[in-house]
Image: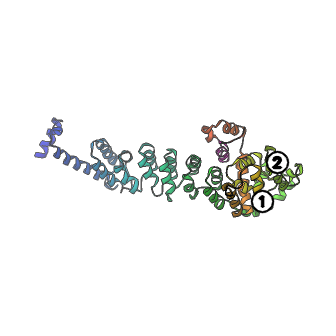
Amino acid sequence: MIGVMSESALSIDPDLEKAAAPEVESRSRTALLKRLTDVVCLPASRINNFERAMTADLLVEMLPEASVEARARIARRLATLSELPSTLTRLLLRDDIEVARPLLVECQNLSDADLVDCIGQATPEHRRLAAARRGLSELASESVVATGDLPAIEALLHNDLAKISAPAVEVIVACTREHPRLTPMLLRRPEIRPSHAYVIFWWASSEDRKLILQRFAVTREVLQEAVSDVFPLAAAENWQDPLSRKGLQFIERRQRNRAALDRSPYNSLDEAVAAAAGGLTRELAEEISYLSGLKPTTGAKIFTDAGGEGIAVLCKATGLPKAAIRALWRGMRRPETDEAGHMTPGLERAVIAYDIMAVDRAQTVLRYWNWSLTSALTPALLKAIRDGDDDAVDEYSAPQRTAMLALSPDFSR
């Protein structure tokens, strides 16, 4: 009878709840929220989807007025479910971090849609917790990277159980230029490819460059064995097919360009390098590039690079002796020793890089640079590089984007 009178009184006087004592209201609210949560958490054998959704909708209406403790309790309950009501889950994921934490850390069944919504709408701390989730999907990883939140990206790179998509890796590669602390984290990821490492090389630190040359400079022996019978076929066709010619030029063992030597005023690449010791002019740099099997754009990138590792790669790949490094260094008017008579850091790095690389591996690096920096350079891309058109990057292929990244800071008009 008392229960009936109370229900009737509530329907007649809506202000009665406001007049109730605070502790009575708190107890009733706590009990109601618990009962509604119990209903949402019922197994599928006890409740259908419409009933669960209806109850979740009621909770969504009530939770903004509930205490943080109450919302956190509900989040902890939901974190154990295999199927979560999306509207209620999204509300809690966007809530204070104390509320969202159980879902972000403990819940194994968050949908990508709900997680992406949280990453895009919630706080940096929410994003960091999301980035550290076990088994984070490629879609969610892309959302983390798209925010540009560096601590969240760092958490993602440290998350060995996360999957990072190729587009997300490319974005992080671009970020390493302005934020070099990301580089060593990215270089240890299994998703990174030689193409990514070779473009990071141009703005990487000396330690990171050493790691790139040691880890990503692979041999081409498998390719050479696989296509050994194709070389005579292409030669019989006088190398007329541009696509096969491009691929075989990357794979072949010979680095120096014999055809360029026939047209050169120098008797050998060694002679051209010796001449460069007296002063490396633009014309002589282009001649050395041609004799080395490179396009002038690639050669210019190597000779204008502040570090010495690129020169070391060039010398090792073309079979030049270590003394050629000093000749080119001298020709570029760079100091060879400091005031104490010690070798300058740049020249020392070049010598070390020369020593740690095998010829075939150096050739792989050099040819990858030549391919990525020149083969994809269309007139439209050249204009985008010159104009600094970063917004147009999505219009181009992966090699083209690589060229844009590597050349845009110092591309010569």
The residue tagged 1 is: 323
The residue tagged 2 is: 287
Q: Residue at x 13, y 44 (%)?
A: 4
Image coordinates of residue 132 in percent, x first then y, are 45, 55
Q: Are marks 1 and 2 in contact (CB under 8 Å)?
A: no
Image coordinates of residue 223 in percent, x first then y, are 73, 61
Q: Nearer the viewer, mark 1 or mark 2?
A: 1
Q: Residue at x 36, y 44 (%)?
A: 91
Q: Which sits in the foreground, 191 or 30?
A: 191
Mark 2 burial class by Cα count in 10 Å: few <14, some 14-19, many 20+: many
Q: Which sits in the foreground, 262 or 16?
A: 262
Residue 381 visible, this orientation: yes
Question: Quick check: is 125 in the magenta stretch?
Answer: no
- Tell me the kind of residue under disc 1: Ala
Question: Quick check: is 400 in the magenta stretch?
Answer: yes
State which region is magenta: 396-409
